[in-house]
Image (tube, rainbow, N blue to C red):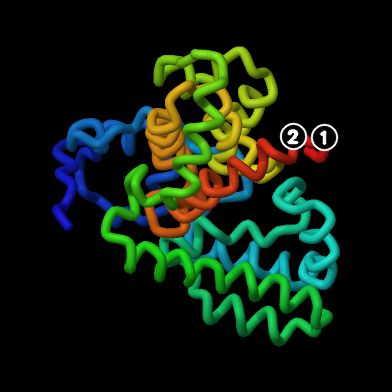
Amino acid sequence: MEKLDCGNVFGPRDREWHPGDWLQESDRLKEVLSSNGVDSEVSSVTSAYRGGESGGRKLLGIFVTRKLDAYGYASENYGETKRGEYGSLLSPYLNFGFISPSEVISRSMESGAKGHSLDAFLEKLALRDFAYVRCALEPNYGSYEAIKKSERDAIEQIKAKDEDRTYRDEDWANAQTHDNVWNGIQRELLLRGRNILNDRNIWCYKIIDIEKASRNAYRVARKLNDKYMLDAMGPVGIFALLTCFESYAAYRMRLAGGEG
């Protein structure tokens, strides 16, 4: 990895800088990033996601002592909605290696949580490994073609009957569409760095709903996901997008049948 050139940003090197110093000196951090060609447009998130290893372990402790015992019931009844209330919120820390799956599993199994809740949570962790396996076996895992062909065909048949509409990338990024529900979810993403109070699938489904061309919908979703989601830029984030697109036709059928 190439070392960043800090130039004269810090002045005299009279002390050693630590991660906490970077957070305290955000203006200097932005100057260093900008001078090295790093896009610092995305602002720092306002949420529980602070710190690295210590932050991840703090959230893990909260989860196993306060939330895990009711996880099975909550995940069945709320799905992705309200995940901020009952979920572990550990995905970004797992994604960047601040905490390991083995530590999460060990702490969870030692917590005394009921079998159903423990099994439900471990199943979610296993899906992360499945995401890595799928991407390893799919040469074009980051492209629109990675979506199963049968599901691509189903989406394109549905979209052929939809209104012809598209938005500029900046309109999407700034939550300036005609859909107030989607705008609200996107604003939450900009503020928190994750959709933890809303269903991430709804965020993705509505992009497909709004954009006439499904291929462009994937491009938009991938761009926003990679830029603003804290747990993006890896197999798990890509797998989440693929799963959303591959379940879109079933979602539209539920809406048409009055079930959604």
Where does the C terminus fall, quadrant-wise?
top right
Q: Residue at x 53, y 81 (%)?
A: 102
Contact, CB < 8 Å: mark 2 with mark 1? yes
Instruction: State the residue position of label 1.
Output: 258
Name the one closer to the observer, 188 or 214: 214
Image height of 189 relative to 148, above or below: above
Name which quarter of the figure residue 169 lies in: top left
Name the one closer to the observer, 8 or 165: 165
User: Residue 94 location, x and y as percent?
Assistant: 49, 64
Residue 42 visible, this angle: no
Local secondary structure at mark 1? loop
Name the one closer to the observer, 199 or 156: 156
User: Residue 229 location, x and y as percent?
Assistant: 49, 43
Q: Amino acid at mark 2?
A: Leu
Q: Residue at x 50, y 61 (%)?
A: 93
Image height of 110 relative to 60, above or below: below
Where does the N terminus fall, quadrant-wise?
bottom left
Residue 211 visible, this angle: yes
Name the one closer to the observer, 16 or 88: 88
Image height of 67 relative to 40, above or below: below
Q: Residue at x 61, y 80 (%)?
A: 105
Q: Neighbour class for label 1 at 10 Å: few (<14), some, many (≥20)? A: few
User: Residue 137 location, x and y as percent?
Assistant: 33, 68
> Could you tell me how far apart the alpha carbons at marks 2 and 1 are, in whole angstroms?
5 Å
Instruction: State the residue position of label 2.
Output: 255
Local secondary structure at mark 2? helix
Q: Amino acid at mark 1?
A: Gly
Name which quarter of the figure residue 223 lies in: top left
User: Residue 206 location, x and y as percent?
Assistant: 60, 30
Image height of 185 relative to 95, above or below: above
Name which quarter of the figure residue 249 lies in: top right
